[in-house]
Image: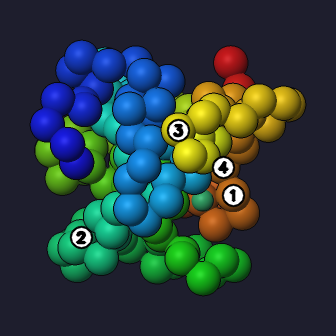
Amino acid sequence: MKAGLTADTLTLSEFNTAMAGRTPPLRVSAEFTAQNGNRFFGTNGAFEFAYLPKQSLVRQAIQSTPQIKVYHGYCAEMCSIARAEQAGVRINSGTITQLRHRIENGVPLGGSIGHNTWIKPCDDCRPVLNIFNIDYKRK
Ligand SMILES: [Zn+2]
């Protein structure tokens, strides 16, 4: 992650826009907010899951739920809760939101599914979020 692109200083939509041009291409950015108020951003394809220790409850939850997509565990939602867990923050009963990333060639794409619009967590992520009682419903 580039320096300064953290939940300490940015809103999720600001972060999502600042990530334009990243490789691999960004599709979704997520923000997890723990019950203690700590916030963590995540992106798809960040590979947090691959480096989680065996005792990680997030890792165990991902591995205990059905794999539907090829990249099971590599969504932005999983990245954000993995970062929270690795920071020592309790993730149970937190909240999460996620935004589409639709900037192509420097231009945000509009329309009903345009840049910075909410997207429901996928079929792989929802069972994991449910294990931790994390609220992912659109506010
Ligand atoms: Zn997902």
**Type of amino acid at the residue the image marks with label 2:** Leu
Q: Earlier in the sequence, mark 4 or mark 3?
A: 3
Mark identifier at residue 62: none
Q: Earlier in the sequence, mark 4 or mark 2?
A: 2
Q: Earlier in the sequence, mark 2 or mark 3?
A: 2
**Type of amino acid at the residue the image marks with label 3:** Gly
Tell me what residue is drawn at x 56 percent, y 46 percent. 105
- The answer to whether the residue bearing label 1 lies less than 8 angstroms from the nearest atom of ligand 1 is yes
Task: Judge by depth and name the residue closer to the eye, 20 or 54.
Answer: 20
Q: Name the residue furthest right.
A: 112
Q: In this rendering, would 64 be left or right of 56? A: right
Q: CA distance from mark 1 to mark 2?
A: 21 Å
Q: Earlier in the sequence, mark 1 or mark 2?
A: 2
Q: Answer with the quadrant where ligand 1 appears in the image.
A: bottom right
Query: Where residue 120 sits in the image (x, y, percent)?
Result: 72, 43
Q: Do the CB atoms of the residues marked 4 and 1 lie less than 8 Å apart? A: yes
Q: Is residue 99 above or below residue 21?
A: above
> Where does label 3 land, which residue?
106
> What is the secondary structure assignment of the residue under circle 2?
loop
**Type of amino acid at the residue the image marks with label 4:** Pro
> Where does label 1 land, which residue?
122
> What is the secondary structure assignment of the residue under circle 1?
loop
Query: Where residue 33 sits in the image (x, y, percent)?
Result: 39, 28
> Where does label 2 land, which residue?
52
- The answer to whether the residue bearing label 4 lies less than 8 angstroms from the nearest atom of ligand 1 is yes
Q: Do the CB atoms of the residues marked 1 and 2 lie less than 8 Å apart? A: no
Q: Do the CB atoms of the residues marked 3 and 1 lie less than 8 Å apart? A: no
> Where does label 4 land, which residue?
121
Q: In this rendering, would 2 be left or right of 129? A: left
Query: Where residue 95 sits in the image (x, y, percent)?
Result: 50, 30
